[in-house]
Image: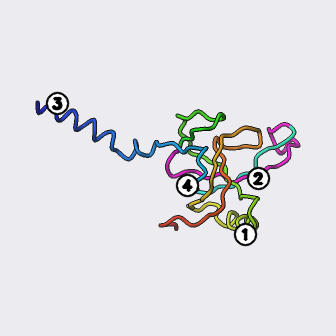
Amino acid sequence: MIRRYCEVALIVGALATPAAAEQRCIDSKLPQPIQLTGILTRKVFPGPPNFEDVRKGDRPEPGYILRLQQPICLTGDDFIEPDRLVERVQIFPDFTKQQDKALARELRGSVGKRVVVEGASPFGAQTGHHHAPILLSITRIMPASGNR
């Protein structure tokens, strides 16, 4: 009886670990804002016509990639498997908002720093212009607490 109790306690403890809780997926169909934390990077990707090499004539496509503190997964989108854990998200300013120029300046000034971004309606990569498995239009960026 005591052995069975210990086995059950171990199973329940394993399920309650932070790793299990962190694997909750973001539902792309829900419109509420989400926040993601990570290190912001900027990279120039090769664009058209061949999406292979800027030095060989492909148009440069600068982009911002957020390297996440904790991997996420995304459900409700046909362009990404719902059980795929992702550590990189391509972010870009929400161009429908008036503050997009200020947000673009904040993005440039935050490269290499640990930040929190806020946005809504993430989606899976669909084209050669998408440079991470998940993309997110952001409306806000701020330093993460404990940022150096």
Dot 3: few (<14), some (14–19), or many (≥20) neighbours within 10 Å? few
Q: Which residue is mark 1?
A: 102
Q: Amino acid at mark 1?
A: Ala
Mark in the foreground, 3 or 2 = 3
Q: Position of residue 143 (x, y in %)?
A: 56, 66
Is label 4 or label 2 in front? Answer: 4
Callout 1 crowding tier (Cα within 10 Å): few <14, some 14–19, many ≥20: few
Q: Residue at x 62, y 48 (%)?
A: 89
Q: CA distance from mark 3 to mark 1?
A: 60 Å
The mark that comes first in sequence, 4 or 2, is 4
Of marks 3 and 1, which one's residue comes earlier in the chain? Answer: 3
Q: Which residues are magenta?
A: 50-72
Does 105 sit left or right of 81 as displayed? right
Disc 4 marks a residue whose amino acid type is Leu
User: Closer to the observer: label 2 or label 1?
Assistant: 1
**What percent of the width, then of the height, locates residue 23?**
46, 42
Please, what secondary structure does the residue beneath circle 1 have? helix
Crowd band around label 2 with a 10 angstrom C-alpha radius: few (<14), some (14–19), many (20+): few
Work out whether mark 4 precedes mark 1 in sequence or the reverse, and give the earlier one: 4
Where, by quadrant of the figure, is residue 80 drawn?
Answer: top right
Q: Is residue 19 left or right of residue 96?
A: left
Q: Are marks 3 and 4 in contact (CB under 8 Å)?
A: no
Nearest to N terminus: mark 3 or mark 4: 3
Secondary structure beneath disc 2? Answer: strand
How far is mark 4 from mark 2, CA to CA? 21 Å
In the image, residue 65 lies in the stretch drawn in magenta: yes
What residue is pinned by disc 4? 36
Question: What's the CA distance linking mark 3 and mark 4?
Answer: 40 Å
- Amino acid type, callout 3: Arg
Q: CA distance from mark 2 to mark 1?
A: 18 Å
Q: Residue 112: which numbered mark, if any?
A: none
Which numbered tag is attached to residue 62?
2
